[in-house]
Image: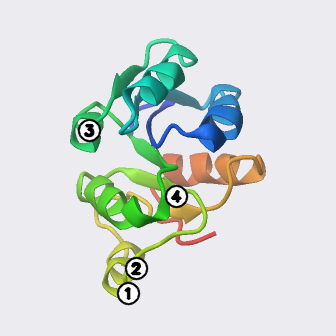
Amino acid sequence: MADGPIRMGIVGCGGLTQSVHIPCVASLEAFRVVAVCDLREEAARRAASRLPGSRAYTEVTRLLNEPLDAVLVCAPPAVHEEVTLAALERGLHVFLEKPPSMTTEARAAWSTPRRDGSSGPWSARCGAMPAPIRWRRSCRSGRSSGRR
């Protein structure tokens, strides 16, 4: 990961993302949101409009093709597994909004230490500012973070 802000994508642009996560991430110089994604185009566009320079998508695969270091998954729990595993396969760090919803196999997959240095999903609310700060340190150091 290069020096400079951590390039982040946000998946899920609903009410909580709009009211809590975007203001939180936007307030931290350590992060730059590159792209956002929501199945509802209007929600994705609204989120992108609040994050200068970010692009809006309605397909997760398009967001994951952006030059990212990390993904903040704020989508409904039913899609946590698919999005998280796709991000981890690309070597991205993952911050997963509570409650995480994954199969036992998926939990085992993201708990395994990664050779590429990406961290398994963090599971905490972004509104608790110390968690994103610890996450930034973990991303920068290349250590796997485990669950929080």
Real-space CA distance between mark 4 and mark 3, rounded to the nearest whole angstrom: 18 Å
Return the residue at label 1. Answer: 104
Real-space CA distance between mark 1 and mark 4, rounded to the nearest whole angstrom: 16 Å
As drawn, 37 above or below 139: above
**Label 1 neighbourhood size at 10 Å, few (<14), some (14-19), many (20+)?**
few
The mark that comes first in sequence, 3 or 1, is 3
Answer whether labels 2 and 1 touch (C-beta < 8 Å).
yes
Q: Residue furthest bottom?
A: 104
Return the residue at label 3. Answer: 59
- Find residue 124 and report its horizontal and vertical position in percent: 65, 60
**Label 4 neighbourhood size at 10 Å, few (<14), some (14-19), many (20+)?**
many
The colour mode here is rainbow
Nearest to the observer: residue 40 or residue 57: 40
Q: Quadrant of the N terminus?
A: top left
Q: Amino acid at mark 1?
A: Thr
State the residue at coordinates (33%, 56%). 83
Nearest to the observer: residue 140 or residue 124: 124
State the residue at coordinates (36%, 83%). 108
Q: Nearer the viewer, mark 2 or mark 3?
A: 3
Return the residue at label 2. Answer: 107
Real-space CA distance between mark 3 and mark 1, rounded to the nearest whole angstrom: 26 Å
SS under mark 1: helix
Indicate which disc residue 96 carries: 4
Real-space CA distance between mark 2 and mark 3, rounded to the nearest whole angstrom: 24 Å
Real-space CA distance between mark 4 and mark 2, rounded to the nearest whole angstrom: 12 Å
Nearest to the observer: residue 96 or residue 56: 56
Residue 57 appears left or right of 146: left
The mark that comes first in sequence, 2 or 3, is 3
Residue 23 in sight in this render = yes
The mark that comes first in sequence, 4 or 2, is 4
